[in-house]
Amino acid sequence: MRFHIFSIIQIVLIVFSVSVFAQNNDAPYFIYEEGAQIKIGHFNKRQVPQGYTIYTVTNVIETDTADYITIKAESLDPYEKPLNSSEFEAVYFDGQISLDKLYLIPVDTLASIEENDWHINGRDFIMPAFMGNGIALAAAYIELETDDNKFFKVSEFSRMVDKFEKYKTKIGEFETCVVSSKLEMQFSGNEIYTIYTWYSKGIGPIRTDYYNQKRKLVKYSEIVEIVLPEKS
């Protein structure tokens, strides 16, 4: 039933794709309200789906100083069959959102963490309340290691605000902030990309392009469905 609802919402959004999603200046650059959900499609350079990730805000605890958010991350295969799921935390304070460093790990890998006794270190992924052209953002990374020397690391660094622009997708047009960065993944081998991510307030990543070291686009991710709670 949930996916039937998604289909209806997607049709409605496509009909109104010429309109720009409204921006709440107080909202962070990620979903933050209970019930909010985004679905991200992952594609190769030929636009063939490689899988999907769904982020859902499952719980919000509001305090006088900050909101503490629980986000469920689910992975689907190219045919939208559920594979794995896990959860990570976020903190929303005065327009800024701090996502637990687990956000950096692909969901499939995240789900396997429970199978091992990992020692986890790192720095959370922070999207500031104020963004401006040329502003440098803090690096984020996560490093996992076991007693038998299994090692995994993901880091995003050299993060810089490039520009602000309207970005049009199949489900609508969004006001976005474009952030460029380097993404490095170390596991069985070492992969490094230059990435460009379009973020929209109250939603999060709209599109991410991945370029290899030869500056060739090798894959991309883009939002394909969205559910936002109705305002009371």
Image (cartoon, grey):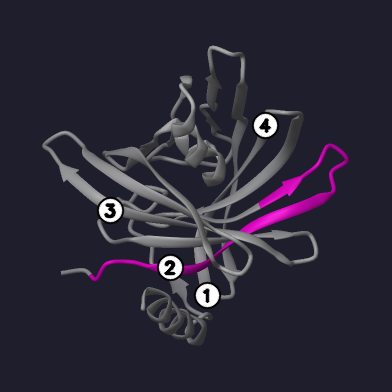
Is 49 on the left or on the right of 2, as rendered?
Answer: right
Residue 197 among magenta residues: no
Residues at discs 4 and 2 in contact (Cβ within 8 Å)? no
Labelled pair 2, 1 in contact (Cβ < 8 Å) = yes
Q: Would residue 39 be found to the left or right of residue 26 on screen?
A: right
Q: Which is more N-terminal, label 1 or label 2?
A: 1
On the image, numbered disc 2 is attached to which residue? 226
User: Is the stretch drawn in magenta largely helix, strand or loop?
Assistant: strand
Q: Foreground mark, 2 or 3?
A: 3
Mark-to-mark CA distance, 3 and 4: 28 Å
Do residues under tags 1 and 3 come within 8 Å of each other at their CB atoms? no
| SS for callout 2 | strand
Q: Label 3 belongs to which residue?
A: 58
Asked if the residues shown at circle 3 and circle 4 are in contact, with their CB atoms under 8 angstroms apart, the answer is no
Q: Amino acid at mark 4?
A: Met
**Could you tell which of marks 1 and 3 lies nearer the N-terminus?**
3
Q: Determine whether 134 is above or below 27 in the image.
A: above
Q: Residues within 10 Å of mark 4 (few under 14, many from 20)?
A: some
In the picture, the disc for residue 171 is: 1
Q: Residue furthest right?
A: 214
Q: Nearer the viewer, mark 4 or mark 2?
A: 4
Residue 220 in which image quadrant: bottom right
Q: CA distance from mark 4 to mark 2?
A: 28 Å
Q: Which mark is residue 185?
A: 4
Quadrant containing the C terminus is bottom left
Q: Earlier in the sequence, mark 4 or mark 2?
A: 4
Under circle 3, the secondary element is: strand
The local crowd at label 1, few if under 14, some if 14 to 19, many if 20 or more residues have their Cα within 10 Å, is many
Q: Earlier in the sequence, mark 2 or mark 3?
A: 3
